[in-house]
Amino acid sequence: MMLKGKKVLVLGMGISGMGATRLLKDKGAKVTINELEDSKEMRARAREFERNGIKVILGSHPLEILPGHQLIVLSPGIPLDIPLLRQAEKLHIPIMGELELAYRFLPDRSLIAITGTNGKTTTTVLTEKILKKAYKDVQIAGNIGIPLSEVVRRPGKIIVTEVSSFQLETIKKFSPFISCILNISPDHLDRHPDLEQYIWLKSRILTNQESDGYTILNRDDPRVYPLRRKTRAEVIFFSQKERLERGVFLKGPHIMRKFEGEEVVVSRDEISFTGSHNLENILSAIAIASLYRLEREAVREALLEFKGLPHRCEPVARIRGVDFINDSKATNEGAVKSCLESIAQPIILIMGGKDKGANFFYLRNAIKERVKRVILLGEAKRVIKAQLNTICLLSEVENMRDAVREAFNKAQKGDCVLLSPACASFDQFKNYEERGKVFKEEVRKLGS
């Protein structure tokens, strides 16, 4: 892809937009970056780019900046239907996402791409750690602060990246050597028109794969399993429920893999981050590593060392016999359900935040079976209350401090207080990490 001398407009100055801008600059493009937000943080970023000869426009997406540009590179958070992009289409200006841009500079590298509604980051990090037991030159990218466009600026033979539905909206040639779809449950329905469209977007990770590649799919997920028909690559399954002729699966207490022969990889009891949601992550990571012919002992060693990631069913403290768990990353119903099913104790559940078009009624059975009380906060609390008020006891609070104290007051020895919001964080927090940190701070105040 020739970029030298081309005028390129980058939309969005978040992590992906900044990565794309640096890559374009490396390739000799004349770059303008346009960001809707005009804040102190964005102005500081703008000054840095301007010192390097990059024009920055903050505060709006003005249509008058389009003429003369030969390419638009889009950050994944920007919807495709904004007026600027509609006008760009009328002017026949090509539009591609940051993921697609980065991929164009990866012809000789082994790319592993992981998607799904839940577990993408954990699986990506775990896969990297397993592969590093045998290969030194493994890099990681995705929604963990490292966009793919940054990684491709450095040498590397194997790249493991997580991929979102937003990124898959704008792919054209993107074709990983190994693709993996972990699970699909309703999410981002505030942006995507319906679940069918969301499933279709997830399946786009398979669109350009060739017969010499691999597709790893969750045999147990009724939305994922049918996607086997959409790929030309060889399909490998993982399953918690079925003994497979080829793939990775559970057999009693053991995690098995069967490729050239069947063998026990590890016992579930040996791993510190199990639970049905994490088992999907573990099984898929083992499947990927097995395609690189990693020895059983190397895979097992990495699994025993890995302790999980923050804000994902993360134990925080035990105070007067009450356990506190931070699952702030659970921004959709599927993630909440998985975490609820992994906890044996009676639960006081803290939910709420910015609604993403979720159907909270989906959680009714899991809540009815496992939750004593739900504490609601944030913009979505009245929507959640309307859908769950016949299922269990509910309380409404204004902020995380009140939520933690209300939950602790209602809890008894042996209970678990779980933050698993089923919502985005942007109504009260910068991101889910900040929400989880505030939760942990408030819990620690209880014990001080």
Image (cartoon, rainbow, N blue to C red):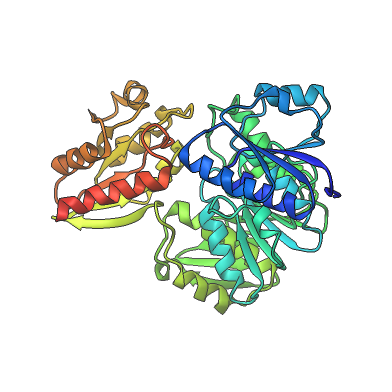
Residue 214 is situated, as x and y percent measured from the top left of the image, at: 74, 57
Residue for point 78% across, 25% down: 89
Residue 158 is situated, as x and y percent measured from the top left of the image, at: 69, 66
Extreme-right residue of the structure: 2
Q: Tell me: residue 93, above or below residue 75.
A: above
Residue for point 50% across, 71% down: 266
Residue 293 is situated, as x and y percent measured from the top left of the image, at: 68, 73
* Residue 113 showing in the rendered view: no
* Residue nearest the viewer, comparing 72 with 185: 72
Q: Tell me: residue 307, above or below residue 8.
A: below
Q: Quadrant of residue 129?
A: bottom right
Residue for point 35% across, 47% down: 436
* Residue nearest the viewer, comparing 226 with 82: 82
Residue for point 72% across, 28% down: 65
Q: Is 390 positioned to the left or the right of 434 in the image? A: left
Query: Which corner quadrant holds the C terminus?
Result: bottom left
Residue 149 is situated, as x and y percent measured from the top left of the image, at: 68, 53
* Residue nearest the viewer, comparing 389 with 58: 58
Q: Is 285 positioned to the left or the right of 22 in the image? A: left
Q: Is 364 positioned to the left or the right of 278 in the image? A: left
* Residue 281 showing in the rendered view: yes
Q: Quadrant of residue 184?
A: top right
Q: For the image shown, how many numbered marks are present on the structure?
A: 0
